[in-house]
């Protein structure tokens, strides 16, 4: 008689059954435990994390690291712009859109052992809003923060703001810090000094080492309230040079090159590497200077024909980008009527010929290779219709000082990427009057009025329609030309899964809580 | 010496004033860099006020001088730490790298010059050295990384130490390993420092080697050398006892010049090798319009340059007593 667990004809005694169950458990323990418990993820950063304080710095490359340690009330679901609960289990919004009530998850503790309560949330929110910290503007519209009981938070707004949940879910949105740590390290500076290189959050990882210019380490939090991360430790090394990052990945010293991997090399990767790509909010776009040749509608039409991204998107990005359908990112909403570039090249040539010599200068926001690649391709297309275009890289930060400058380039090629996924954030950062990224300071009051009206509406479809209409207005007026929405492309060792890339995050911010082998 | 020290103060003050003026004409806005690209104008203005950047440049400079008198270089906009603390953290790594690079540059340079003095045609070594030294520094650095780390796996390609749990009393890992009774640390540190220091040393070796070689060649043609040779003094003794010392002035001056170039090369080499020194710190600070940090590092480099040049002049006066300090 064969004696095996799978042998149904075998005599089934309780002892044998228990032996089989124990064997299966032990087998699983032997196979799974060493892998699960001791896995280390090694990721490079190009530069330092300036500050680990979630309220006091606009960290870009390191924001994913910070958000592995701290959590907010809500967050974006990986791979989408859908808002889901994080420390808030559920929430309600009042009819007038002025009161938001959040119900906290139970049984959460900070890494220092302090239990999460509504009072802790109030303390963190007030710290961000009232202590002069850099990211206070995320709560500018919050009039009152209340904790009616231990598990409930109420936010009362000055004015209805349909994008409030997005502001809270933003990578830079408010995070909850241990009140014990805030009290212990306040030092008259809202604990900003201590929180520069220490942390006390509720996230799946605790901050281990914080050694600027060298490395940062995260250790899995054993008491984490949510799903336990696969990796027990994340080692984040500072490797400023891209060539070094690529060599390290190929040599097996790191597990991923999170961003900037040269597009041309993506098609000939070694067999032990693979790519994870997700749509992102990185929209390459052009801002136009008032008084440039593009103010003439005929020239603008001809130039749009030549720079039509359909002509060069494959050369610039391969399959890792899509043509922008609106001044609002493709991930924000799908417009009913996407913007359209003219396609009649002969007509464009004739139009330029009628205007004699047309010259254009294109300013590049930075020296990053993608800008140069796009401007080279666009200049080649412009030459085809007789426009003489040149490009120059602007000095660091110069794009923010172009307003009113006579020698500013005719076009500014930049990435317009908002800090949250709501169209209100995109318009508020790039289009409306006095928006920080409205680089030439152009004003279109009719479109701005639509944006303002949309920001207070609760009806999502009506809001989207207004934003779409405003987008057409900014484009048709020639203020803003969206080109392509680039993907977030991470090159990593084979077998790495569930990277948790989120469109709103800056590229390459892997979610250490979801990633696994 | 007093003259040199007074010069040091003047240079530091002039340099700091220059960097302040530069800040007022550059388009980069430090307040925007701190607040982030999406921050509303009101937030940026609040940050500007908090950092004192809303004041006229001359007022800012006056405040800076007052702080400087107390040894305070301000707070870095990027790291939010006192600049003196940041510099203290990164300076040992840079000094260690510079010292090894200068050593690795000077020793083969002197050896090459001596080789040329003894054997007039060591062409191959000279051509090889000039070839390597004339390559752009970033290319040399990348080639070294590719060959000795990636292909051959003989040496580490980046970082300062393979061990993660070490922190020594002086910050100089080569020394601290021995001081703490862990010689393995020093060996590991030496392995890590070799490639970046070789990248930095090559142009130094070529420049000093060529200067030394010509100077030595000229000295060895002098009448007193010919007389000594006629008296039967051996060639080795002639070179070491009479030639080297008399030929040292020009190469020593070249060391001073090379140190200035070394500061520029540090920014490239530290970045490629992920070396946690002042060069790397400076590159990131420049990218973030972090004026206090840029100013602090510039002043440290300025002071180092002057100290090295004082040392060079001391050595020159020792080699040639006619040179007055």
Image: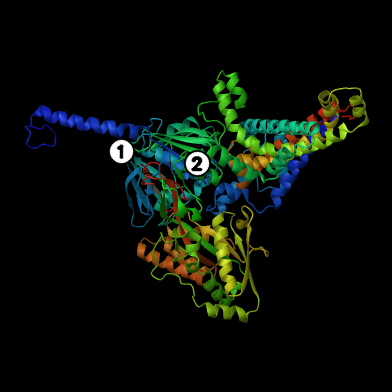
> Where is residue A441, by image quadrant?
bottom right
Q: Nearer the viewer, residue A497 or B134?
A: B134
Q: Where's the C terminus of chain A, which quadrant?
A: top left
Residue receiving disc 2: A248
Q: Which mark is residue A24?
A: none
Q: Is residue B97 left or right of residue A423?
A: right
Q: CA distance from mark 2 to mark 1?
A: 42 Å
Q: Position of residue A403 (x, y in %)?
A: 62, 61
Q: Position of residue A353 (x, y in %)?
A: 61, 80
Q: Nearer the viewer, residue B285 or B129?
A: B129
Q: Is residue B19 left or right of residue A214?
A: right
Q: Secondary structure at mark 2?
A: helix
Q: Is residue A207 left or right of residue A347?
A: left
Judging from the image, mark 2 belongs to the subunit labelled: A
Q: Which mark is residue A106?
A: 1
Q: Disc 2 or 1, which lies upstream in sequence?
A: 1
Judging from the image, mark 1 belongs to the subunit labelled: A
Q: Is residue A437 visible?
A: no
Mark 2: few/some/many CA within 10 Å (<14, 14-19, 20+): many
Residue sitting at 57 percent across and 25 percent down? B187
Q: Secondary structure at mark 1?
A: loop
* Vertical arrangement, residue B208 with respect to residue A465, above or below: above
Mark 1: few/some/many CA within 10 Å (<14, 14-19, 20+): some
């Amino acid at each position: 008689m064969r004696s095996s667990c799978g042998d149904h004809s075998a005599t089934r005694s309780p002892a044998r059954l228990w032996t089989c169950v124990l064997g299966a458990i032990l087998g699983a323990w032997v196979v799974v435990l060493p892998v699960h418990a001791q896995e280390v993820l090694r990721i490079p950063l190009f530069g330092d994390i300036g500050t680990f304080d979630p309220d006091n710095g606009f960290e870009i490359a390191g924001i994913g690291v910070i958000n592995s340690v701290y959590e907010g009330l809500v967050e974006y679901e990986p791979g989408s712009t859908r808002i889901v609960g994080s420390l808030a289990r559920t929430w309600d919004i009042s009819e007038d859109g002025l009161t938001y009530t959040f119900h906290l998850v139970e049984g959460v503790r900070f890494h220092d052992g302090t239990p999460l309560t509504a009072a802790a949330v109030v303390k963190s929110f007030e710290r961000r809003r009232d202590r002069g910290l850099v990211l206070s503007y995320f709560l500018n519209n919050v009039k009152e923060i209340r904790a009616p009981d231990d598990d409930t938070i109420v936010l009362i707004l000055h004015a209805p703001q349909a994008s409030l949940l997005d502001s809270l879910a933003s990578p830079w949105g408010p995070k909850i810090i241990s009140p014990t740590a805030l009290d212990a390290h306040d030092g008259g500076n809202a604990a900003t000094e201590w929180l520069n290189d220490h942390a006390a959050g509720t996230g799946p990882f605790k901050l281990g080492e914080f050694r600027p210019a060298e490395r940062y380490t995260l250790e899995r939090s054993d008491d984490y309230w949510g799903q336990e991360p696969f990796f027990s430790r994340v080692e984040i090394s500072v490797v400023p040079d891209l060539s070094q990052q690529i060599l390290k990945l190929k040599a097996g010293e790191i597990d991923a090159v999170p961003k900037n991997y040269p597009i041309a090399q993506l098609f000939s990767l070694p067999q032990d590497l693979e790519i994870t790509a997700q749509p992102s909010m990185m929209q390459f776009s052009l801002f136009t200077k008032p008084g440039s040749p593009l103010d003439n509608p005929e020239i603008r039409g001809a130039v749009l024909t030549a720079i039509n991204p359909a002509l060069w998107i494959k050369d610039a990005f391969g399959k890792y980008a899509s043509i922008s359908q609106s001044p609002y990112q493709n991930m924000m909403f799908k417009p009913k009527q996407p913007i359209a570039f003219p396609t009649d090249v002969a007509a464009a040539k004739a139009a330029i010929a009628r205007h004699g010599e047309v010259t254009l200068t294109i300013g590049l926001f930075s020296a990053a290779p993608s800008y140069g690649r796009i401007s080279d391709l666009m200049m080649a297309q412009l030459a085809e219709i007789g426009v003489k275009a040149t490009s120059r890289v602007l000095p660091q930060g110069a794009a923010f000082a172009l307003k009113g400058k006579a020698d500013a380039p005719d076009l500014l090629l930049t990435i317009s990427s908002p800090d949250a996924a709501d169209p209100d954030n995109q318009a508020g950062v790039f289009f409306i009057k006095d928006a920080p990224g409205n680089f030439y300071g152009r004003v279109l009051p009719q479109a701005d009025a639509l944006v303002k009206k949309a920001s207070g509406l609760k009806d999502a479809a009506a809001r989207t329609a207004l934003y779409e209409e405003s987008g057409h207005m900014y484009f048709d007026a020639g203020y803003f030309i969206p080109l392509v929405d680039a993907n977030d492309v991470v090159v990593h060792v084979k077998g790495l899964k569930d990277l948790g890339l989120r469109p709103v995050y800056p590229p390459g911010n892997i979610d250490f809580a979801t990633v696994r082998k | 010496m007093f003259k040199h020290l007074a010069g040091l103060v003047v240079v530091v003050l002039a340099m700091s004033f220059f960097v302040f003026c530069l800040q007022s004409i550059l388009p980069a806005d430090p307040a925007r860099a701190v607040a982030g690209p999406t921050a509303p104008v009101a937030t940026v203005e609040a940050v500007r006020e908090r950092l004192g950047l809303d004041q006229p440049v001359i007022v800012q400079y006056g405040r800076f001088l007052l702080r400087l008198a107390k040894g305070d270089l301000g707070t870095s906009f990027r790291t939010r730490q006192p600049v003196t603390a940041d510099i203290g953290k990164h300076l040992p790594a840079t000094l260690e790298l510079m010292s090894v690079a200068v050593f690795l540059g000077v020793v083969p340079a002197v050896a090459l010059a001596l080789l040329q003095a003894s054997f007039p045609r060591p062409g191959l070594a000279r051509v090889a050295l000039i070839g390597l030294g004339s390559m752009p520094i970033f290319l040399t650095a990348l080639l070294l990384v590719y060959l000795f780390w990636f292909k051959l796996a003989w040496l580490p390609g980046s970082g300062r130490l393979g061990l993660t749990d070490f922190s020594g009393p002086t910050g100089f890992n080569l020394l601290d390993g021995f001081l703490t009774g862990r010689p393995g640390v020093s060996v590991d540190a030496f392995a890590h420092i070799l490639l970046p220091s070789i990248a930095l040393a090559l142009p130094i070796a070529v420049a000093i080697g060529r200067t030394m070689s010509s100077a030595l060649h000229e000295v060895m043609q002098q009448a007193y050398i010919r007389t000594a040779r006629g008296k039967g003094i051996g060639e080795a003794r002639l070179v070491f006892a009479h030639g080297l010392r008399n030929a040292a002035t020009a190469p020593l001056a070249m060391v001073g010049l090379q140190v200035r170039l070394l500061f520029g090369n540090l920014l490239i080499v530290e970045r490629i090798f992920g070396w946690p020194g002042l060069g790397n710190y400076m590159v990131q600070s420049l990218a973030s319009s972090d004026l206090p940090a840029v100013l602090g590092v510039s002043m440290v480099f300025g002071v180092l340059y002057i100290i090295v040049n004082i040392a060079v002049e001391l050595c020159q006066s020792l080699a040639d007593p006619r040179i007055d300090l």
